[in-house]
Amino acid sequence: MNPSNYTKNDVVFGIHPVAEVLSAGRRPVYKIFIKRGKTGRRINEIIELARSLDIPVESKTGREITELAQNPHHQDIAASTGPYPVMRFKQMLDQAGSYGDELFFLIIDSVSDPQNLGALVRSAVCTGVSGIIVPKNRSASPTAAVSRASAGALEHAGICVVTNLANTMKDLKKNHFWITGLDQQGQQPVYETDMTATRALVIGGENTGIRPLVKRHCDFLCRIPQTGPINSLNASVAGGIALYEAMRQRIQKTKKTL
């Protein structure tokens, strides 16, 4: 899918993504399409919620829903929606909070697989990340496929798509962020790296990791220790480990200050 497509009307598909796009209420939903004769608790809940929001529900054949979604893995349900609400950088900062709130952002550098981006977004939402930054080029975009891969978590995520990731990192530093990159050559294990205070974590792409220019703008590099014969982890798995370690540290720090 073209990276610019997140600015156009969309078709969200799958039970969880459709349910979450309705509950999040962040973009307009014009119509729900359900396979003719399809029933079940989750489907009935979606129909009830859609009708409470005055959103029409229409029956379609499975083939018609496949054509609408441009994907066969739609679980017999799709929704015609407005574009994904991508945020501007300043808007993300303003909505996330102030410096004293110890914000935590996730920077996803050149993750091109929608499955990996969706998994990272889901982990970020589950760990309370304040905002997610992805580059416009050489990266998967926040599309319906990513919403499906995130099981609908994308609909609750604040995502900013930027043209120049290095310049955005400079702007983060001007706003008191420390930036940590997750890299196999990192100086210390992620478990010994301070993830508290106002911080951004950089996760690199599936094959190349963090790009050299982006890496140069990191204040620290940390690694995930490994003992097996494989020398690298899937990007979304590595990101999930680091995000949950950051959450653990931040919860522990909060408890100590109470």
Image (cartoon, rainbow, N blue to C red):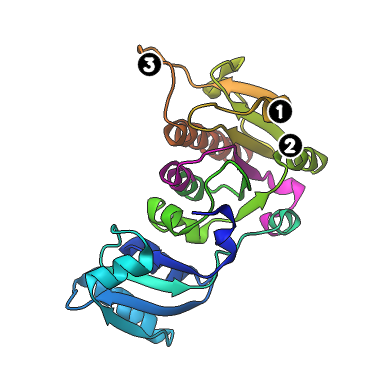
44 or 60: nearer the viewer: 60
Locate residue 22: give its quadrant: bottom left
What quarter of the picture does the C terminus occupy? top right
The residue positioned 48% from the left and 73% from the top of the image is 81
Q: Nearer the viewer, residue 13 or 120?
A: 13
Foreground of the two, 74 or 200 = 74
SS of the residue at dot 1?
Answer: helix
Q: Foreground residue, 151 or 36?
A: 36
Label 2 neighbourhood size at 10 Å, few (<14), some (14-19), many (20+)? some
Name the amino acid, label 3: Ile
Which stretch appears magenta?
Answer: 95-120
Q: Residues within 10 Å of mark 1 (few under 14, many from 20)?
A: few
Which residue is label 1 attached to? 213
Percent position of residue 158, x then y: 59, 56
Three-letter amino acid code at the position of disc 2:
Ala
Q: Specify which label sits upstream in the sequence, 1 or 2.
A: 2
Tag of residue 166: 2
Which of the two labelled residues, at mark 1 and mark 3, occupies the earlier sequence position? 1
Residue at 45% across, 46% down: 114
Residue 161, placed above or below residue 251: below
Query: Secondary structure beneath disc 2?
Result: helix
Q: Give the residue pinned by disc 3.
A: 230
Q: Say whether residue 216 is left or right of residue 254.
A: right
User: Few, some or many C-alpha atoms within 10 Å of disc 3 (few <14, some 14-19, many ≥20)?
Assistant: few
| Total residue callouts | 3
Are the residues at dot 1 and dot 2 in contact (C-beta closer than 8 Å)? Answer: yes
Residue 46 belongs to the span the image colors magenta: no
